[in-house]
């Protein structure tokens, strides 16, 4: 579940890995096309998480600290995936060539 940015109603969001479900996600209340907002903290936490690996090789005490931080970062990322933030999808650009099927030939 997440909140629609246009009408503030709750919207049922598809599973994180369901790419097709996310592609066609629209608000059932106002029909706004929605997409997932990329959480900024994942970009910050992922390199930090990788940086903890060498810390774990520097002795037992550092290994324990690294383990606790890794679990904490993992929980934060997982919590973000469970409750995604939505934003309005940008409208598609206008096509350069339009196909007029119903017009009679000249
Ligand atoms: Zn809506």
Image: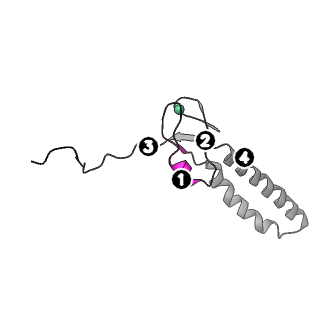
Label 1 secondary element: helix
**Cβ(mark 2) to ligand 1 < 8 Å?**
no
Tell me the quarter of the picture where residue 51 sits.
bottom right
Tell me the quarter of the picture where residue 53 sits.
bottom right
Whether pointer 4 and pointer 3 mark residues with C-beta atoms closer than 8 Å, the reply is no
Residue on which disc 1 sits? 20
Q: Earlier in the sequence, mark 1 or mark 4?
A: 1
Q: Earlier in the sequence, mark 4 or mark 3?
A: 4
Residue on which disc 4 sits? 79
Residue 50 lies, in percent from the top left, at 71, 64
Label 2 secondary element: loop
Q: Which residues are magenta?
A: 16-36
**Cβ(mark 4) to ligand 1 < 8 Å?**
no
Q: Quadrant of the N terminus?
A: top right
Q: Gap in Å between the C-alphas at discs 3 and 1?
A: 17 Å
Q: Gap in Å between the C-alphas at discs 1 and 4?
A: 22 Å
Label 4 secondary element: helix
**Quick one: 36 or 59, which is closer to the camera?**
36
Q: Earlier in the sequence, mark 3 or mark 2?
A: 2
Label 3 secondary element: loop
Residue on which disc 2 sits? 85
Q: Residue at x 63, y 51 (%)?
A: 16
Residue 37 lies, in percent from the top left, at 57, 45
């Amino acid at each position: 579940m997440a909140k629609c940015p246009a009408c503030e109603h709750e919207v049922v969001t598809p599973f994180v890995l369901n790419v097709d479900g996310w592609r066609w996600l629209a608000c059932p209340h106002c029909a706004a096309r929605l997409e997932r907002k990329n959480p900024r903290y994942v970009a910050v936490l992922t390199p930090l998480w990788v940086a903890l690996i060498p810390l774990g090789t520097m002795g037992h005490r550092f290994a324990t600290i690294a383990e606790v931080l890794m679990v904490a970062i993992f929980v934060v990322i997982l919590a973000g995936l469970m409750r995604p933030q939505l934003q309005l999808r940008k409208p598609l650009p206008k096509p350069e060539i339009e196909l007029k099927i119903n017009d009679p030939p000249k």
